[in-house]
Image (tube, rainbow, N blue to C red):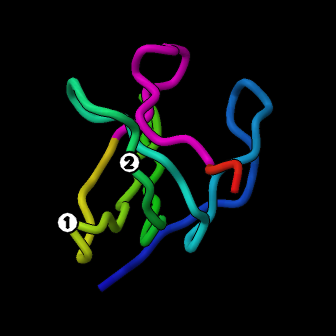
């Protein structure tokens, strides 16, 4: 199994999140949920984050689309 993660900066100059970072994720119609980044994969259109949530401890993929605020589903947790 290959796990890719990046610690550089994206096109807007923001630092990429890293594996083991605490994050919150936006889900359909509900409040943001807390989790931990398990893996990160970069694409031209954005970044995929594999995030472990309480209900999905093995992880579920979320996509952050480059340049589209409505397409940002994963954000670094403040706590």
Nearest the viewer among 18 and 58 is: 58
The residue positioned 69% from the left and 28% from the top of the image is 11
Task: Where is residue 65? Give x, y as percent.
Answer: 43, 26
Which mark sits nearer the N-terminus, 1 or 2?
2
Nearest the viewer among 58 and 13 is: 58
Label 2: few (<14), some (14–19) or many (≥20) C-alpha neighbours in 10 Å:
few
Horizontal side of residue 58 vs 40, given as left or right: left
Give the image quarter of residue 57: bottom left
Look at mark 1 in the image and give the residue it sits on.
55
Give the image quarter of residue 63: top left
Question: Magenta span covers which residues?
Answer: 63-76
- Asked whether residue 51 is drawn in magenta, I would say no
Horizontal side of residue 62 vs 18, given as left or right: left
**SS at badge 1:** loop
Is residue 44 depicted above or below 53 in this figure? above
Is residue 63 depicted above or below 71 in this figure? below
Look at mark 2 in the image and give the residue it sits on.
33
User: Which mark, by number, is residue 76?
Assistant: none
**SS at badge 2:** strand
Quarter of the image for the C terminus: give it: bottom right
């Amino acid at each position: 199994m290959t796990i890719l993660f990046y610690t550089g900066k994206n096109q807007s100059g923001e630092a990429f999140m890293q594996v083991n970072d605490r994050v919150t994720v936006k889900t359909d119609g509900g409040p943001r949920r807390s989790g931990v980044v398990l893996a990160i994969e970069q694409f031209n259109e954005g970044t995929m984050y594999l995030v472990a949530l309480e209900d999905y401890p093995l992880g579920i993929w979320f996509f952050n689309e480059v340049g589209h605020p409505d397409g940002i589903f994963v954000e670094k947790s403040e706590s």
